[in-house]
Image (tube, rainbow, N blue to C red):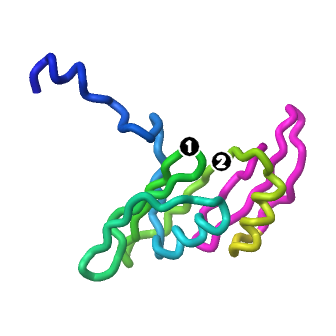
Amino acid sequence: MTESRAHHVRPIPEGYHTVTPWIISRDSAQLVDFLTAAFGAEEIARVVGEDGSIGHAEVRIGDSVVMMFDAKPHWHDTPAFLRLYVADGDAVFQRALRAGATQVTEMTHLFWGDRVGRVRDPFGNLWWIQT
């Protein structure tokens, strides 16, 4: 790449942030469905392999992209731990439970003023829902 072209290449693609979470799932298609129902995610990409497994998928939640792909059968589970900042944590917490999450902690006020509750999605990932 020439030096002049290098000055025009964006180091971070449009719509992404410096850090992008990547979830390895046993069923990324159902994970996308859960994220849509629980957190209002918008699917932006999906690559399906010949065997029907998802090799790559992306959703946008708020201003962030979450990537995922299906684990190979012999891989160990690797749950993700994610903090989700929202305007109304109580409403999102209840929505996540209705979508199939299980409660880990109740919504509570923390000493510095934030309100937070934790849920585990049906795939083992832990979400801190926080306002």
Residue 83: give its label: 2
Residue 53: give its label: none
Q: Main secondary structure of the magenta part?
A: strand
Nearest to the eye among marks 2 and 1: give it: 1
Kind of residue at badge 2: Arg
Pointer 1 residue: 63
Q: Nearer the viewer, residue 57 or 109?
A: 57
Residue 115 painted magenta: yes
Q: Which residues are magenta?
A: 103-131
Query: What's the CA distance linking mark 2 and mark 1?
Result: 13 Å
Label 2 neighbour load within 10 Å: few <14, some 14-19, many 20+: few
The quarter of the picture where the N terminus appears is top left
Residue at 53 percent across and 45 percent down: it is 64
Ranked by sequence position, the earlier of labels 2 and 1 is: 1
Task: Report x, y in % for residue 112.
Answer: 86, 32
Task: Report x, y in % for residue 12.
Answer: 37, 34
Residue at 44 percent across and 61 percent down: it is 68
Label 1 neighbour load within 10 Å: few <14, some 14-19, many 20+: few
Residue 93 painted magenta: no
43 vs 14: above or below: below
Kind of residue at badge 1: Asp
Helix, strand, or loop for circle 2?
Answer: strand
The quarter of the picture where the C terminus appears is top right
Q: Is residue 39 left or right of residue 90?
A: left
1 vs 52: above or below: above
